[in-house]
Amino acid sequence: MSIVSRKLFGSSVLILLSVGLAAAFLVLWPKPVSVVLAGISLLCGFAALLVFCRAAGRGYALLVRRAIFLASGSFGLALVGLAWKYRQSAPTFSSASLFTAAMLSLGAVATFLITRSFDPRKINLKS
């Protein structure tokens, strides 16, 4: 199996895992564990993006990093707002939301650490 097909196989597995976790989120929605499953699903999707950008070329790493930072920040703020809204009525749901926001923050930091070795001067994006 060539290197590219191994990477595409890995990203395909991550996408399937992400879709499965998203389906589990929909099935278990009112429970606090559903929020954690949604966060893990997002992290699997982000990981698949990173694998795709490595298979396609290192030039796409900075674009993927920006997209992951934007998505992670947006979902993190939404989860913090959800935690604030349910802090009195459902404290376990609130705690799960904060835990998921922290997971997404760690995922964004991991994305930065993975893609920081790419030199932005060597990027050659052909549109």
Image: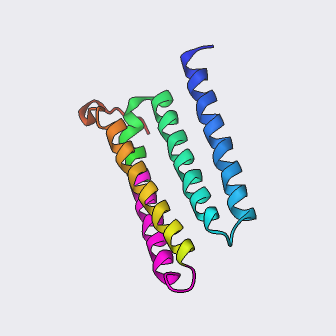
Left or right: 1 as drawn, with respect to 52: right
Rendered image coloring scheme: rainbow
Residue reaching furthest to the bottom: 88
Q: Residue at x 69, y 68 (%)?
A: 29
Left or right: 56 as drawn, with respect to 6: left
Closest to the observer, 109 or 45 = 109
Q: Position of residue 117 (x, y in %)?
A: 29, 32
Q: Quadrant of the N terminus?
A: top right
Q: Which residues lie in the magenta part?
A: 68-90
Closest to the observer, 47 or 65 = 47
In the displayed structure, would residue 2 be above or below residue 47? above
Closest to the observer, 4 or 29 = 29
Residue reaching furthest to the left: 121
Q: Position of residue 37 (x, y in %)?
A: 61, 56
Work out whether residue 125 can be spotted: no
Q: Quadrant of the C terminus?
A: top left
Q: Position of residue 49 (x, y in %)?
A: 51, 41
- Specify the principal SS of the magenta part: helix
Q: Residue at x 35, y 48 (%)?
A: 109
Work out whether residue 74 can be spotted: yes
